[in-house]
Amino acid sequence: MTTTPRRYHITTFGCQMNKADSERMAGILEDMGFQWSEDPNDASLILYNTCTIRDNAEQKVYSYLGRQAKRKHEQPDLTLIVAGCVAQQEGESLLRRVPELDLVMGPQHANRLKDLLETVFDGNQVVATEAINIVEDITKPRRDSTVTAWVNIIYGCNERCTYCVVPNVRGIEQSRTPEAIRAEMEELGKQGYKEITLLGQNIDAYGRDLPGVTETGRHLHTLTDLLHFVRDVPGIERIRFATSHPRYFTERLIRACHDLPKVCEHFHIPFQSGDNDILKAMARGYTHQKYRAIIDKIREYMPDAAISADAIVGFPGETEAQFENTLKLVEDIEFDLVNTAAYSPRPGTPAALWESQLSEEVKSDRLQRLNHLVGVKAGARSQRYFGRIEEVLVEDQNLKDPNQVMGRTQGNRLTFFNGDIGELKGQLVKVKITEIRPFSLTGVVI
């Protein structure tokens, strides 16, 4: 008699760290004999990997959970899991809100999924949110792409930005050793991956917690040292890293990106606000002048580098004049892309308790104005690609046009062109750019 394998479904909210965690947890479930199900209603195990950065992400989790909790009354063997940052933040109160839940687990527990599930299958409801030392990953993620992959290099964050819940939910900074990171990259190179994005909540802090300093008192392990250490992993053609913090971004790092051929000339450095008083209230630890100096230095070394960022509008107390300083920064720098958000108060953060909260109308108006300017500037910045020959790493078919493939330039610009995905997937292709849009390009193969 053959038993049909149990099926699982994972829904991921939020950042790249969560995507990387979801891929690891999927790998564990497949090792346990589960099979992926596209439709959550066909799955007997459902995992929501959650995010607390914005309120609507949290509300979405509750609405999804409600639907599956009802299903559990008809199918008692359904296993419901909430992982990630909402789980870490809410802990047992999640079980009170949704008693049908089997497992609530914080992001640091992703690698322990198998042990935790075995406890669940023994009939227990489990909450795993206590702080632990990160165990080195031995799990093989089920990666969503066969061309590009994430590699975590540092977990957690020691910053204390007044709007952010990440330090509360992801714990203190813990760097992986350069040897472990390189070993994972070598394995990925053997499996045919061509591009790696090194990930950290605050990636420039990499290595501060690892032992060892040079004679001059500099830490032996910095992001710059790591880039030199992994620059020649066989099979890996491109290396990216995110997310950077302006406070730790050094000229030495910029020089490494310029000197190492495989490191992409693409920088993601959030500025959050263009106003010094707001930056101070956010506890960001830099001024807009310092931020501009970093961008100037990058462009001095690499005039063509792509620069993307994050920005928050409507932070408590932000005046119209302060918001205009953010617009001015975007106007002056001409980013390739800015991820924008209206401030939303998060539980357990200082800014959530301030009385100077702005109305939703003001926040929404500022967000629209910023988005409009970002689009205009990205469009202007795109002009430089017209008629150029760009090297594109082909990742997938264009979902809207099966005759086209899509991939990214070294500067991370999405590019479409006619071609057969069967032949081109994972290839670096020279493409002449014939059409430009603010955030993507179209071209023809040379």
Image (spheres, helix red, strand yellow):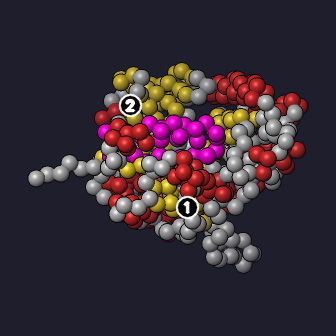
Q: Does the magenta stretch include residue 43?
A: yes
In the image, what residue occupies the spot 65% across and 64% down? 172
Q: Is residue 335 left or right of residue 115?
A: right
Residue at 67% across / 25% down in the picture? 375
Please state which amino acid type lies under the numbered disc 1. Answer: Thr
| Front in this rendered view, residue 55 or 418 | 55
Query: Horizontal and vertical percent for residue 417?
Result: 43, 26
Q: How many marks?
A: 2
Can you say whether 443 is above or below 274 in the image?
A: above
Image position, residue 230 (x, y; %) = 52, 61
Quadrant in the rendering for residue 173: bottom right
Q: Front-most of 144 and 352? A: 352
The alpha-carbon separation of the residues under discs 2 and 1 comes to: 40 Å
Question: What residue did someone put label 2 on?
Answer: 397
Q: Mark 1 points at which residue?
A: 129
Q: In this view, does 173 lie to the left or right of 44?
A: right
- Front in this rendered view, residue 80 or 258: 80
Residue range corresponding to the magenta coloring = 42-68
Q: Which residue lies furthest to the left in this view?
A: 1
Residue type at the position of mark 2? Gln
Magenta stretch: includes residue 386: no
The structure residue drawn at horizontal position 85% and vertical position 49%, both measured from the top left corner, is 280
The C terminus sits in image quarter? top left
Q: Quadrant of the rendered structure where residue 275 is?
A: top right
Q: Does any portion of residue 124 appear in the rendered image?
A: yes
Up/down of 66 relative to 35, above or below: above
Secondary structure of residue under mark 2: strand
The residue carrying pointer 1 sits among few (fewer than 14), some (14 to 19) or many (20 or more) residues within 10 Å by Cα, namely many
Q: Position of residue 6 (x, y in %)?
A: 28, 49
Which numbered disc, 2 or 1, marks the residue closer to the eye? 1
